[in-house]
């Protein structure tokens, strides 16, 4: 039986993919820790962190947390990486929210000097499944090699309401959907392909991938392929692939849609 290298096959992550930024909504934090565990499982060191705000990691997510408020020069980072392999870094725990405050570009540099990989949650979504960035979002480090935009597929077929959408005004402006209208595959593609949407702030040299999370929560089995086709069709050559799966189920046996020309029948190439 052949074991698939999830990092390489689905996300194109190898030893040269040193900085990974995760944006969007619907599973960013879960994906960050999932990727960190996969990197660790391959015997490489990794720092998970944020340039925005996240809740401090649970023990099963990350065994070691370093706060800059206690170790401003990250003097303990190399030692902790030698012991744990995976370390989470943040500025401090904010008393008002209990969240871990994010780090700046220079701190990302220091993390890269100690670890083989840095995985950054570079966007906020307040627990929603889809979002459009505000003018100050996302906060993608300049060193980023790979940007992964996440969408929670449980928003598909749902109305444009606050329950599902974060940054409502920006979302409606980019997609053209009014509040109460149904979120369609075309709307997801329009959001992700817009320069002020999913592509906002992506460094020119970075690879760009979309991850459709919560695929297990959609009813129409054809919706994933339709959504992937819309995304690739509206983004064009800037996107490398669309990956679909379920982080909750740790299931990546779903699908990988690569950005290659459609056949004469208009079908998208499914590499699952």
Image: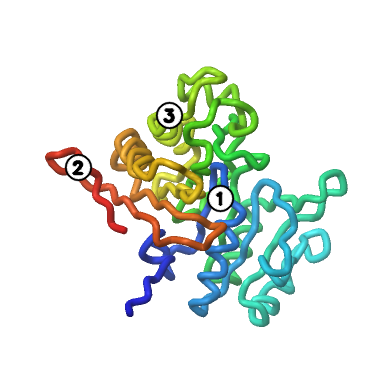
Quarter of the image with the N terminus is: bottom left
Label 1 Cα neighbours within 10 Å, binned few <14 / some 14-19 / many ≥20: many
Mark whose residue sits in front, 1 or 2:
2
Q: Nearer the viewer, residue 125 or 236?
A: 125
Identify the residue position indicated by label 2 in the image.
Answer: 262
Task: Where is residue 137? Give x, y as percent.
Answer: 59, 37
Disc 1/disc 2 C-alpha distance (Å): 33 Å
Question: Would you identify the image quadrant in which residue 86 lies?
Answer: bottom right
Task: Where is residue 134? Give x, y as percent.
Answer: 60, 30
Q: Residue at x 48, y 30 (%)?
A: 196
Q: Nearer the viewer, residue 129 or 90?
A: 129
Q: Which mark is residue 201?
A: none
Quarter of the image with the C terminus is: bottom left
Q: Residue furthest right?
A: 95
Disc 3/disc 1 C-alpha distance (Å): 27 Å
Q: Specify which label sits upstream in the sequence, 3 or 2.
A: 3
Q: Residue at x 19, y 42 (%)?
A: 262
Q: Residue at x 70, y 48 (%)?
A: 53
Q: Say above or below: 63 vs 270.
A: below
Identify the residue position indicated by label 1 in the image.
Answer: 141
């Amino acid at each position: 039986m052949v074991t698939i290298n999830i990092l390489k096959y689905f996300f194109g992550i190898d030893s040269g993919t040193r900085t990974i930024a995760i944006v969007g909504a619907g599973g960013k934090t879960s994906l960050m820790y999932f990727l960190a565990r996969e990197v660790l499982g391959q015997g490489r060191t990794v720092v998970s962190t944020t340039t925005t705000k996240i809740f401090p990691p649970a023990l099963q997510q990350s065994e070691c947390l370093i706060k800059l408020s206690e170790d401003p020069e990250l003097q303990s980072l190399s030692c902790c990486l030698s012991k744990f392999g995976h370390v989470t870094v943040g500025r401090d725990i904010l008393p008002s929210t209990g969240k871990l405050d994010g780090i700046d570009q220079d701190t990302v540099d220091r993390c890269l000097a100690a670890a083989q990989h840095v995985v950054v949650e570079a966007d906020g979504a307040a627990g929603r499944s889809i979002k459009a960035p505000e003018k100050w979002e996302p906060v993608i480090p300049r060193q980023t090699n790979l940007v992964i935009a996440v969408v929670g597929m449980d928003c598909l077929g749902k109305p444009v309401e606050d329950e599902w959408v974060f940054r409502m005004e920006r979302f409606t402006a980019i997609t053209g959907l009014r509040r109460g209208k149904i979120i369609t595959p075309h709307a997801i593609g329009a959001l992700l392909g817009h320069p002020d949407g999913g592509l906002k702030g992506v460094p020119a040299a970075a690879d760009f991938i979309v991850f459709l999370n919560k695929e297990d929560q959609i009813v129409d089995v054809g919706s994933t392929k339709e959504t992937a086709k819309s995304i690739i069709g509206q983004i064009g050559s800037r996107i490398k692939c669309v990956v679909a799966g379920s982080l909750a189920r740790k299931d990546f046996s779903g699908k990988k849609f690569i950005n290659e020309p459609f056949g004469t029948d208009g079908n998208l190439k499914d590499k699952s």
